[in-house]
Amino acid sequence: MAEDLNIVSGSKEEKYISITAQIKALIDGEPDLTANLANIAAALKEQFGWFWVGFYMVKPNETKGADELVLGPFQGPVACTRIAKGRGVCGTSWAKEETIVVADVEKFPGHIACSSASKSEIVVPIFKGASVVGVLDVDSDMLDQFDDTDKAYLEAIVELIQL
Ligand code: SME
C-alpha cells in the first residue's frame, strides 16, 4: 500500500466510501494493532479534518481492580488518559455496548470535556466477539456534525480491525 492517501471532496458518503477502501488496504495483512489503529486515526483525520479522532482501549487497572478505557492512538490535541466504565460519552458507549451520537456535548450529562473546543461527538464501540474491547471516539469543533451515515460507516470501519 502506498503511504499517500487519496483525499476526496464530495458528499459525506462519497468520502466514507473512498476512505473505507483505503483503510482496508492500509491495514490488510498488518497484524500489529497499534500500527493499524494509528493509521485509521490518521486516515480519518486527514479525510474529514475532525478536531479529534482516536481510540480508547479497555485495559485492566490493577489498583482499582476494574477495567477502564485507556487512551490509544489518536490525532488531535492531547486528551484525557483514562475513562471509567459508564463515564462520559466513551464510558457510556462501552457500558451500553452501542454507538452514541451527541449533537451538543454540553447537553450530554457527564460528558468529559478534554477540550472546550469539542462541540459534538460520536463514539463507536469495538467488539471482539460479544465483548467491547475499545471505542473509536470522534470529536468535532462544530455542533451536530454526526448522524446515521457516520454511525454506519464508522461501525463498518471498526469491524475491519483485526483484534
Ligand atoms: N469527550 C469524551 C472524552 C474523550 S475526549 O473527547 C478525546 C467523553 O465524554 O467520553
Image (cartoon, grey):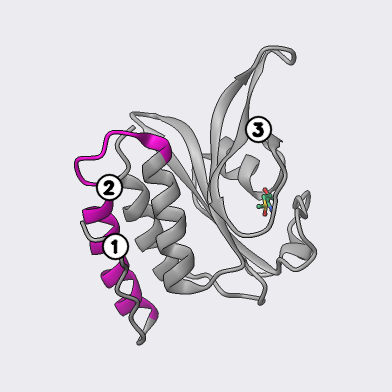
Measure the alpha-carbon separation of dots 1 and 2. Answer: 11 Å
Q: Secondary structure at mark 1?
A: helix
Q: Secondary structure at mark 3?
A: loop
At a point 45% along the width and 58% down the height, the residue shown is 42
At a point 30% along the width and 79% down the height, the residue shown is 14
Query: Is residue 22 shown to the viewer in this render?
Result: yes
Determine whether label 3 and label 2 are within 8 Å by CB: no
Picture coordinates of residue 37 (x, y %)? 42, 45
Q: In the rendered structure, which amino acid carries the disc numbered 3? A: Lys
Instruction: Establish whether ligand 1 lies closer than 8 Å to the Cβ of label 1.
Output: no
Q: Quadrant of residue 23?
A: bottom left
Q: Quadrant of residue 69?
A: top right
Q: In the rendered structure, which amino acid carries the disc numbered 1? A: Thr
In the drawing, what numbered circle is on residue 20? 1
Q: Secondary structure at mark 2?
A: helix
Between discs 1 and 2, the one toward the N terminus? 1
- Which residue is under mark 3? 85
Vertical comparison of 140 with 27: above or below: below
> What's the magenta region?
12-34
* In this rendering, position of residue 78 left or right of residue 127: right
Mark 1 or mark 2, which is nearer to you?
2
> Dot 2 surroundings within 10 Å: few (below 14), some, or many (20 or more)?
many
Mark 3 or mark 2, which is nearer to you?
2
Vertical comparison of 109 with 56: above or below: below
Does 96 appear in magenta? no
Mark 3 or mark 1, which is nearer to you?
1
Q: In the rendered structure, which amino acid carries the disc numbered 2? A: Ile
* In this rendering, position of residue 158 left or right of residue 101: left
At a point 31% along the width and 67% down the height, the residue shown is 4
Magenta region's main secondary structure? Answer: helix
- Which residue is under mark 2? 27
